[in-house]
Amino acid sequence: MEESISLLGRLKKEFGCKEVDIRSYSPLTLAYIGDSVYDVMVRTVIVGRGNQSANRLHKTAVHFVNAGTQARMAEALQETFTEEEADIYRRGRNAKAYSTAKNASVADYRKATGFEALLGYLYLMDKPDRAIELVKLGVERLGLEI
């Protein structure tokens, strides 16, 4: 029987990615991948809820995948972060980004960047269960429904 391998593990294997100490990555690099991880998580749940038009799927996703919602989620989750997670979040939140969100305050954008950095870190550490746990808890604490 073939051993199960994660998406991350499979990508690294198939594309010959070298092992890297994830802690050496800049917070903005972590946020870059974390943004996509969060987007895929939300879109996967939305699609899993049933077949809808692409327009409807997009409108639903935009409600969750934006700096304001991500900032509120980060605030609601801070007390549940481990010490290591809180450190990654802080590094992401405090990183000097050279762009800002179109429809968010600077404070929300920074909190969202911290949250994305944390999700990127968890993904690259191959800890999808923890990333899912945090997003699910964040959705619950905000009283949202995907």
Image (cartoon, grey):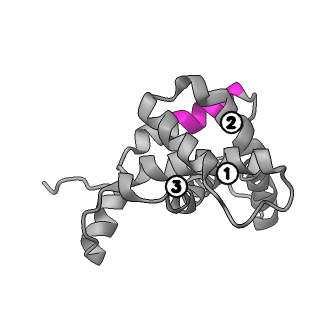
In the rendered image, residue 83, in percent from the top left (x then y), is placed at 44, 29
Q: Which mark is residue 17?
A: none
Three-letter code, disc 2: Met
> Dots 3 and 2: beta carbons under 8 Å?
no
Residue bounds of the magenta highlight:
133-141
**Front-most of 109 and 1?**
109
In the rendered image, residue 118, in percent from the top left (x then y), is placed at 52, 45
Q: Residues within 10 Å of mark 1 (few under 14, many from 20)?
A: few
Circle 1 residue: 50
Of the image marks 1 and 2, the number of the one nearer the N terminus: 1
Three-letter code, disc 1: Gly
Circle 3 residue: 27
- Report the mark closest to the observer, 1 or 2: 2
Q: Residues within 10 Å of mark 3 (few under 14, many from 20)?
A: many
Three-letter code, disc 3: Pro
Circle 2 residue: 73
Q: Is residue 81 left or right of residue 109?
A: left
The residue positioned farthest toward the left in the image shown: 1
The residue positioned farthest toward the bottom in the image shown: 15
Q: Quadrant of residue 12?
A: bottom left
In the rendered image, residue 117, in percent from the top left (x then y), is placed at 54, 51
Q: Quadrant of residue 32?
A: bottom right
